[in-house]
Amino acid sequence: MAILDLPLVSPDRDLASFRPLKALHHFRNLVADKEDTKEVFFIIEALKGRKIRAQAKAFLTTRTAHDFMRREETLPIADMLDDHDRWANCSPNSVAQHYISFMKREGLTANGLVDESYAWSPREDRPEDQVEWYVNRIRDTHDLFHVLTTYGRDALGEASLLGFSYAQNHNLGVRFIAYAGAWQIRKVTGTKAPLFAAIREGERLGRSAAKISHQDIEALMREDIDDVRRRLNIGEPAVYRECVEILESEGNMVANVGLSNPQAA
């Protein structure tokens, strides 16, 4: 069935939940095994709240969203992003070339995150509605957020990016992981770096920027990355970079502390 023929919201979908004790339980599991990405999805599901529901409904009723749905019926975003040959004729400073370099350097694929999300909640168990397309679009653009914002994949970079993502998409679970991640880094390292200020900076930058997941991703990939950052009003994460410098000066390897790669929008 075509995406546009699906209901806006399935009656089987729980659009808002707030279960902090469950979130805390899964956060403790994540701290115990920082590579267990499925715990991130449990946290996000437990604390998703109501704002994302309103944002999804508002966007899904627009002509822009309908155009994207028709196009992505045959070419989902994750498949498009993973087709590196598609971007071969893009300029060296295009978003596409920066994205490809990032993904190759980090050993990532967009579909890798898709697979992780379905390992947590199988595709056949997910509600069939337009909201599912919307939340998948947020998921599939996670690493594009990294490229456009310049947040690294170190523990603080992931946490700060989740602050940015929370301001863009309003999932309370994402915000919880951001601040819990900063707390865990502080606990492990004893650093003097202003970690929580870096998360707040991410939230501020996310509020100021246009919503990345609402963009024409295919067109954006072909643009000059500096032009895109200006057009979308994506600011510089100065506090985050200051924190990284402090952590490194203290002898803390930022890639090895705290939470590893909590990839979820």
Image (spheres, rainbow, N blue to C red):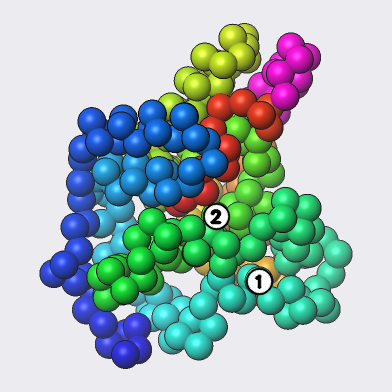
For residue 86, side relative to residue 75 (left or right): right
Residue 68: tell me if it is visible.
yes
Q: Indicate whether residue 240 is drawn in magenta.
A: yes
Quadrant housing residue 84 = bottom right
Quadrant housing residue 9 = bottom left
Q: Exactly how many numbered labels are in the figure?
A: 2
Q: Secondary structure at mark 1?
A: helix
Q: Indicate whether residue 39 is drawn in magenta.
A: no
Q: Earlier in the sequence, mark 1 or mark 2?
A: 1
Q: Position of residue 41 (x, y in %)?
A: 38, 49
In this view, 231 is above or below 218: above
Query: Which amino acid, mark 1?
Result: Asp
- Tell me the chief SS of the magenta region: helix
In this view, 69 is above or below 233: below
For residue 254, side relative to residue 52 (left or right): right
The span from disc 1 to disc 2 (Cα, nearest Å) is 13 Å
Q: What residue does disc 1 label?
A: 82
Which residue is at 30% across, 53% downward? 52
Q: Secondary structure at mark 2?
A: helix
Query: Which amino acid, mark 2?
Result: His
Residue 44: tell me if it is visible.
no
* The magenta segment: 238-253
Q: Position of residue 19 (x, y in %)?
A: 21, 38
Tell which of 148 and 246 is nearer to you. Answer: 246
Q: What residue does disc 2 label?
A: 142
Q: Check disc 2: other Cα within 10 Å, few if <14, some if 14-19, many if 20+.
A: many
Tell which of 120 and 170 is nearer to you. Answer: 120
Q: Residue furthest right?
A: 92
